[in-house]
Amino acid sequence: MSEFASTSTATEDKHAHTLAQVVKKMDQRELLKFLKDRDDIHLNRHEWDGIFNNQHISGRAFLNLTKLDFLSIRLPLGPAVELADFVEELRENHFKTFSSRNILGELLRKYKLDGNSIEAIPLFKLE
């Protein structure tokens, strides 16, 4: 049985992608929406338009940008540092998308349940 579980785990982990891999495939429009939706990057509308409408940056290009690149397109220092830090974190794989196994583990920990399967979740009783 443990042999089956480890095979299943390996298969699930193989399909989990890093956020950098997802960003790399984004076109200009998808990348702009993704970045605007983040709470940790603070740019005003003019700065967003300057980066994406004028510079034609796709996800693949974005992952190669540095603070100097952002400064060279006349972004203020603060937003340039924020974007450069975010790119660096993506490159270092600090962000991962979740495989179903990771999500299950988080839920089990959140509700203080032991185990690695849904069998650890107690059944509720109808009253």
Image (cartoon, rainbow, N blue to C red):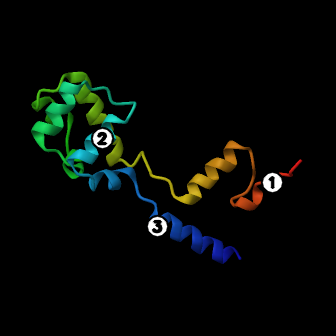
- Residue 127 location in percent, x, y? 89, 47
Which quadrant of the figure has residue 78?
top left
- Residue at image location 31% in from the left, 38% down from the top: 35
Q: Earlier in the sequence, mark 3 or mark 2?
A: 3
Up/down of 17 relative to 112, above or below: below
**Mark 2 burial class by Cα count in 10 Å: few <14, some 14-19, many 20+:** few
Dots 3, 2 in contact, CB < 8 A: no
The residue lying toward the viewer, choosing from 23 and 114, is: 23
In the rendered structure, which amino acid carries the disc numbered 3? Lys
- Residue at image location 17% in from the left, 38% down from the top: 52
Residue occupying the far right of the picture: 127
- Residue at the disc numbered 2: 33
- From the viewer's perspective, is the residue at label 3 or at label 1 nearer? 1
Instruction: Find the distance from the CA under tag 2 to the CA under tag 1.
Output: 40 Å
- From the viewer's perspective, is the residue at label 3 or at label 2 nearer? 2
Q: Residue 82 carries which label?
A: none
- Residue at image location 22% in from the left, 29% down from the top: 80
Dot 3: element? helix
- Residue at the disc numbered 3: 14
Instruction: Find the distance from the CA under tag 3 to the CA under tag 1.
Output: 29 Å
In the rendered structure, which amino acid carries the disc numbered 2? Lys
Dot 2: element? helix
- Residue 124 location in percent, x, y? 82, 52
Dot 1: element? loop
- Residue at the disc numbered 1: 122
Instruction: Find the distance from the CA under tag 3 to the CA under tag 2.
Output: 27 Å
- From the viewer's perspective, is the residue at label 2 or at label 1 nearer? 2
Dots 2, 1 in contact, CB < 8 A: no
**Mark 3 burial class by Cα count in 10 Å: few <14, some 14-19, many 20+:** few
- Residue 39 location in percent, x, y? 40, 31
Which quadrant of the figure has residue 44?
top left
